[in-house]
Amino acid sequence: MMNSLLEIVWDSGSPPPLVHLAFKFLYIITKVRGYKRFLPLFPHEVRDLQPVLDMLAKQNPRDPETWETRYMLLLWLSMICLIPFDLARFDGNLVSLEGQARQPTMDRILDMAKCYLVVSDKARDAAAVLVSKFIVRPDVKQSRMADFLDWMLSMLSKSSSQTMEGTVIVNGMLQALVNTAFPLKDCWVYAATVLECLDSCKLSESNQMVLRKLGMKLVQRLGLTFVKPKVAKWRSAQGAAVQNQKREVSPAEADDDDEEYDIPAEIENVVEQLLVGLKDKDTIVRWSAAKGIGRITGRLPKELADDVIGSLLDCFSFQETDNAWHGGCLALAELGRRGLLLPSRIPDVVPVMLKALTYDEKRGACSVGSNVRDAACYVCWAFARAYEPAELIPFISHISSALVIAAVFDRDVNCRRAASAAFQENVGRQGTFPHGIDILTAADYFAVGNRVNCYLTISVYIAGFSEYTQPMIDHLVNMKINHWDSVIRELSTKALHNITPQAPEYMANVVLPRLLPLSVGSDLHTRHGAILACAEITHALFCTLIEKLSLSKMPFRGDPIISGWQWLINDSLRHLTLVSSAARQHIKESAVSALAALCNEFYINERGEADPALQDELVTQYVSELQNSEEMIRCGFSRALGALPRFLLKGRLQQVLEGLKKVTVISPEDVSFAEARRDALIAIAKVCQTVGVKGDGCQQEFVCRDNVDQIYATLLTGVTDYTTDSRGDVGGWVREAAMSSLMEVTLLLVQNEAELINASICKQIMCWLAQQSAEKIDKFRAHAGSVFLTLLHFDHPAVPHIPHREELERIFPRWEKETLNWNAASEAFPRITQLLGLPAYQYHVLLGLSVSVGGLTETTLRYSAQSLFDHMKKIQSDPSALGSFCETLLKVFEDNLRNDRVSVPLLTMLDQMLANGCFDMFTEQENHPFPLKLFTLCKEEIKRSKDIRKLRSSIGVFCGLIQFRGDMREKVFFQLFLLLCHPFPIIRKTTASQVYEMLLTYSDVVDPAIMEQAMAILSDTNWEAELPVVRERRNCLCDLMRVPRPQLVAKVRWECAPGAAFSMELSLRMFPASCRTRGMAEAAA
């Protein structure tokens, strides 16, 4: 590409616009790759010098349209000028033909550079590069460097950065000096003069950020020329190792000679300017100053370097601005990264770093300091690489706690992620952070991106580690509840509520006494946060307090305070909707535990019974709340009923069970109340365990013959809950609870009166569990499998009436009960598909497999399909087994017709089974009933459907059915040709594509004489065109293959009586021509 563009440039016949266009393309390449990578690709031979100089001389420096050309020519010249020949050799006879003296090549190049250093476009940058490479040539350095530097310094001193023109000139001079500063190490005598001129310009007072940045870069590079280029031997070993990995240290730098040498006085000036630069208002200037501090300190003796660090620590005063703190943190990180912060300085630096991690200064309606906190995380990251673990051991607890707090509680996502990255670096390199891996797993880079999740979920997990609990609480109380952002204040108080169970004594004895005075303070933000915090902590403590006081048997029996406690528990259960979802479960459990303890201690009399009036009031009130319109209230009181002791349930069992049963029933008004149904099912099992079992007992007091069927019916209903909403498969929560409750009730009956379990109930339980064990969601499949094996292998005593027990124990040996990983599809499906051979389980397992094989999850789909196909291969030679399987398959399809949860994946599964030859036994028989019935069901399933996925799956099934002989083929072709004119273009296109593949696969279904023509129509037609065009091509295909053309049904209108009429429009359904008249007649009749 570059050679092609340069050919245009070299061609003398190329018009100027074309040459400019070529240079513009070259500039674009340079912009993408960077000029440093691009420069060596330019031709740079001796013969190129004069032509490039001549082209550059012809350019107009002020033409705004061709600046790319000038930029590229200057860069090109900067590469050519590196040729290792004295430029005087190119001059020859300097007298021209006209007798006038010609300008030497060296002067021409310098004049070009001077001209373009003062322009306002991009060519100024290229001119600075040219100067940096040209001025250090030995011949130029000897004869022109001094004069050129004088010119640059005079231009710099005469120009003012307060005017636009002066800013352009100063910018050009500074760029040239910055790029030339490193070569000046061989001529350091000029450095003092340049530094003095730079001081007189007072660039730090300029309002131009670019000029201040260039000035800072020039100062640090000048400073490096005043000190020897050697690496400090006093660096920390770890920091030195990290730096030495990045570059090869020269022999001079690695010299072990400890010879002292005098440091020029200019170094003090340089360091002072860099320290001032750390406080600049622009980040890029502060960053440049920080890197300069790091580079120069690395060449200073240990004592002087320590003085620099001492001056740097002065930036961390609360009299300084956030700019100074940010610059100071960047400098500390640079020093730490280079190993220049010795371990002796760690006690001075760590407190400063910890303050910077929480730096937040109020400015008007907001605050500043996020950049300081981000830079402080960089310091922690650098320290992890700079020090040995033993050197940081005394400070590990403080640093780890501060980083965790920043990662979880910082307001800004970039700071949370920076803290998480620093914590990860420390865990990896230091290995001394408490519970580092566990915390990293919960608070990784992506997890901390969600602020609400950080405050309400991750913080609770981390607070579970005692090393972090108190620092997190203290931070929330000291820094966050008085935050200017109301969202942060509210999140902080909710976090305190959630963390309270981790440290209830500390909250009650330390935190609340600190918050109470703040709640009446003068600052509005502090008062608001303190009041909210007091409320949240008190709320979290009270239920625990009631439970503990009840268990302590305090002498409050008959005291009015008991009514207050009962009211508080009821109020907590009624207001769960006002609590964050993360804390809701904990509050519910705390309230229920407190209720159980309160009832057991204060509501029972000496005879072990409850006061009838109290019992009636409590049970009736709780049962009535089960029909509340708020889902969370139903949840709370369901669990409360499940926690009631036996003496309160005595004589009220049926009332409680009926109330809980109503919660489990799905109605249009509460279809999304999955959590309420889940808690009701859990409560039913708890109630049964509480009251116990007595076969001949009263149904108002025990689980007995009269109510056991009702209990099982309610629990089995829960296993069929497949409700979905915006949260996903919320019915899964209900199914999981139902399976657990079925197991608990069954084991309760088995251990007491096993005869209450009849064969029908046991079969239903095991079949539903088998179905759930074959479904697609790993979590629920694993739970179902665990319950299934628990019931199968329970032997104290064994569960009666389990169908095919011996075969099940062979498929699932007892020793695999704990080791079988149901979460892994590769382990679960090969086992569960073996149940297809057991008649009692075949229907339910196939129903579950249909959802898995036709699902979207790749791993589940792969292993479930492979296991199913393996089973089909085993029964291919057994007509009876295959026939039974097909009957069950049709039964599953028929029972779930129009149930998209099952029918859509079932169609996908059927497509795969037909493609894999699972029914090849039937293909040789004419008009076998299985494909005919399957065709009818598929046709009925897609009737009036607008589901794209369903329609596309059905196309595959229809194409697969073409392999069966008899009348089936004409019906399939007719149905496919109907779909070729479907209203949805994607369906028409998919049908054409799959019919084409079908004809290639089953070539015997079409006369070979018309095969080529039929396939040409299918492949050449644009099936996404307008319907009239598509219909014409479809009809040609029908005629060619002798399939009746589908016909549109006309509208029919009947007159009923004079003045009254009604019309019935038959939808635009298509029928064969032979059926059209009969269909119209039947409709008219």
Image: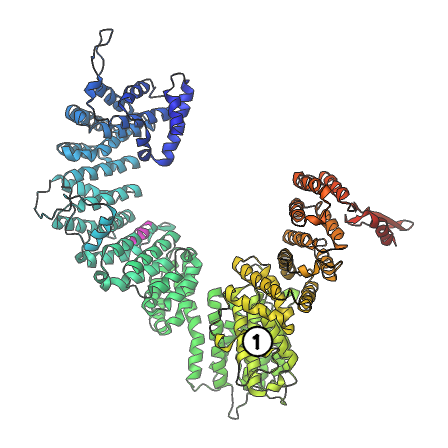
Residue located 54% across and 83% down the image: 690
x, y percent for residue 633: 56, 70
Numbered-mark total: 1
Q: Amino acid at mark 1?
A: Leu
x, y percent for residue 290: 24, 45
Residue 700 located left or right of residue 545:
right
x, y percent for residue 916: 62, 57
Camera sees residue 627: no
Camera sees residue 496: yes
Residue 906 located left or right of residue 474:
right
Q: Which residue is mark 1?
A: 808
Image color mode: rainbow
Residue 296 higher or lower than 448, as above or below: above
Nearest the eye: 265 or 41: 41
In what quadrant of the picture does the C terminus appear?
A: bottom right
Residue 504 higher or lower than 909, as above or below: below
Q: Of helix, strand and loop, which mostly describes the magenta segment?
A: helix
x, y percent for residue 949: 63, 53
| Label 1 Cα neighbours within 10 Å, binned few <14 / some 14-19 / many ≥20 | some
Report if residue 986 lies within the magenta region: no
Name the element at disc 1: helix
In what quadrant of the picture does the N terminus appear?
A: top left
**Magenta residues, as a range?**
371-376
Report if residue 372 lies within the magenta region: yes
